[in-house]
Amino acid sequence: MPASNSRLALLLATCGLFCLIAMSTIIHAATSSATLGQLIFWRSAVALPPIVIYLALRGQLGVALRTKRPGKHLLRGVLGCIVMGLNFTALAYLSVSVATALSYLTPILSMLAAIVILRERPSLIVVAGVAMGLAGVLLMLFPELTGAEMRDGTLIGIAAGVGMAATSALSRVQVKDLTRTDPPASIALSFGVLSTLFGLATLPFGWPELHGQIQLLLVGAGILGGLGHVFMTEAVARAPVTLLAGYEYTGILWAFMFDAVLLSVHLDIWTIAGAVVIVSAALTVAYGQGAFRRPSTASV
């Protein structure tokens, strides 16, 4: 298992969040042209080469193909496929920023799961930070839930997002458990293979022909997804689940940027206020875990 290193974990998480939010933006744009099965297949199949290259560079390719816990890998793969399917469904009906905001229910559930299953004990500052993050998410969702008319499919998107968050909490704890015995990238490899097979299994139900531009976008989504998955798995292996649960709130900044710049989505006062609260929560959690404290130099 990699040595604990909170600062490195936060750097890895930042890279992973950028890749995953960029992938979500592409998926959002492609949902009108491709089926859910196609999205899962291309996101997963194209992600495999970056993962294999990563393993080879680390000299872990042989180790990654062997595991004493195939059942755990299978369970993590099934949970991951469900998370991916629900996430893509939410992106089909919601903006990237709102779908991302819903995913931030995951840290609340992850913290509870880590306490029960992994027996982690977060400080009161961490608990307060996660609660603050939830308040920020609610601020962002306020216009969606109280508008005079809800856009068609909004309730479907919200339900998918909440379901994704709940399943993702279980999946994250499974990843943390597997990193105790297996290389982090081998977890990404097994998940990539299983989700590719799952997506391919939908072929008999009909896949529409994809135009060249959409095909290139899906290839890009797969590459970004593979890199993001490796980054985040490495981050989870180096820090408590509760630390990353709070820090991942900062991913909303990337979602806002992609929504505004690429998708021309208007940012209202509620989303901006929610973002301020969410980033404050992330910094609170990171501080509570000691990520920004200087190591003591006093002699013993």
Image (spheres, rainbow, N blue to C red):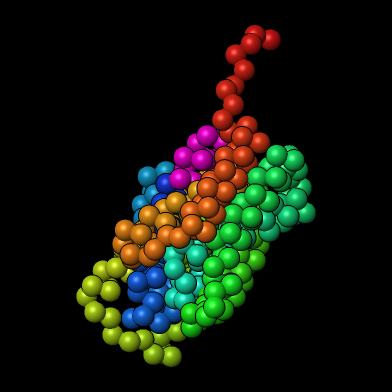
Q: Is residue 274 left or right of residue 132?
A: left
- Quadrant location, the C terminus: top right
2 falls in the magenta region: yes
Residue 70, image x, y percentages = 61, 63
Quick check: 31 above or below 181? below
Q: Is residue 272 magenta?
A: no
Residue at the far front: name it: 148
Question: Which residue is situated farthest in the top direction here?
Answer: 299
Q: Is residue 244 above or below residue 261?
A: above
Q: Is residue 258 visible?
A: yes
Seen at 70% across and 45% down, the residue is 128
Q: Quadrant of residue 213?
A: bottom left
Point 63% across, 41% down: residue: 285
Instruction: Identify the residue shown where x is 36% and y is 52%.
Output: 53
Residue 87, how many percent across, how many down?
51, 69
From the viewer's side, name the closer residue of 17 and 56: 17
Q: Residue furthest bottom?
A: 205
Total residue callouts: 0
Q: Is residue 60 visible?
A: no
The correct choice, above or below, for 48 with respect to 111 in the image is: below
Query: Which residue is nearer to you in this view: 115 or 176?
Result: 115
Q: Main secondary structure of the magenta part?
A: helix
In the shown orientation, is residue 179 left or right of residue 217?
A: right
Q: Quadrant of residue 19?
A: bottom left
Measuring from the top left, give residue 172's x and y in whole percent.
61, 57
Q: Which stretch appears magenta?
A: 1-14
The residue positioned 28% from the left and 85% from the top of the image is 209
State the image quarter where residue 103 is shown: bottom right
